Structure formats: C-alpha cells, structure tokens
Amino acid sequence: MTTEQALASSLPAVSTGTAIWRGLRCRCPHCGEGRLFRSYLKQVDQCAVCGEAYSQIRADDFPPWLTIIIVGHVLVPFLLMTEHMGMSLEAELLLWLPITLLSVVALLPFTKGAIIGLMWSLALGGDETP
C-alpha cells in the first residue's frame, strides 16, 4: 500500500454535498486539498495529495448541458429586457454574444468539478467506492 492509498483510506467519509462543494471549488472531492484539473477541463488521473483515482469518472456531456441551462436562465431575462427596450439586432449581438461566451467558458470548469464530485460520491463511473 502506497502512502497516498494509506492517506486516502484514513480520511473520514465524505457526504455528497461536501463532495459537490469541493468539486465546485475544483478540488479533490475526497480530501478537498488536491487539484481536480491539470488544465482547463482535463481532470487529473489521481489526486496528488490523497491518491484518490479519478481516471474512471467521465462527466461527458452533463457539465456543458448544466452550464448552458444556468447561463441561459441568468442571461435570457436581460436579453429580453434589451429586446423590449428596442435595441437593434446588431447591438444585441455585439453585447450578448461575448457575454454569453465568456459566461460559459468561465462557468464550465466549476460545473464539471461539481459533477465529478457528485459522481465520485455516488460511486458512478467505476468499480471503486468512495
């Protein structure tokens, strides 16, 4: 048994809410210390602190779908408000396309982390249990 595996087995059980919160912070859902991503959306194979494996967890399309739902629900009321004010189509495109794109790009890693935390806490995506 490696040092990381000994540390991972000695950590207390983690609730689903805590795992989601840690994932939302882009941290290891198990220990809360290690980084969950090695680059923008590329998750680590295992936590550098506790050694918990994440290579078996595949969030796939759920994080982008959730991000689109959140951004849409936040921005559409403002888009409708500017439409009601009589703003030209060109001005709306110049305003809302960059805001939407930046919002999605900024939010996506956090939603992916939360989904990985959820999947890890429910033992979805692999043989190992939390």
Image (cartoon, rainbow, N blue to C red):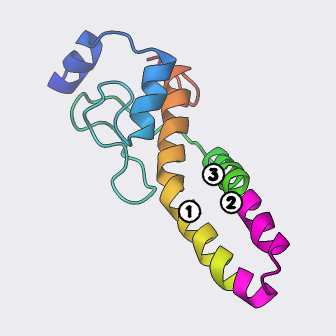
Picture coordinates of residue 49, whole percent (x, y): 21, 33
Element at label 2: helix
Between discs 1 and 3, the one toward the N terminus: 3
Q: Is residue 79 magenta?
A: yes
Asked if the residue at tag 3 contacts the one at tag 1, i.e. Cβ–Cβ closer than 8 Å, the answer is no
Q: Main secondary structure of the magenta part?
A: helix
Badge 2 local density, few (<14 within 10 Å), some, or many (20+)? some
Q: For the point 73% across and 80% down, which residue is it?
A: 92
Q: What's the residue type where badge 1 is placed?
A: Ser
Name the foreground residue: 83 vs 108: 83
**Marks 1 and 2, how far apart at CA:** 9 Å
Nearest the eye: 58 or 86: 86
**From mark 1 to mark 3, how far is it between C-alphas?**
9 Å
Measuring 30% from the left and 29% from the top, which residue is drawn there? 32
Examine the image and state in which quarter residue 29 appears.
Answer: top left
Q: Can I make out residue 130 in this image?
A: yes
Q: Is residue 24 left or right of residue 122?
A: left
Q: Is residue 67 left or right of residue 86?
A: left
Find residue 83 and report its horizontal and vertical position in percent: 82, 73
Mark 3 highlights which residue?
A: 67
Point out the stretch of residues depicted in magenta.
76-92
Task: Please state which of the two labelled residues, at mark 1 or mark 2, is closer to the viewer.
Answer: 2
Image vertical order of residue 100 relative to residue 62, above or below:
below
Q: Residue at x 58, y 61 (%)?
A: 104
Q: Which residue is mark 1?
A: 103
Q: Name which residue type carries label 3.
A: Thr
Q: Which label number is shown at residue 75?
A: 2
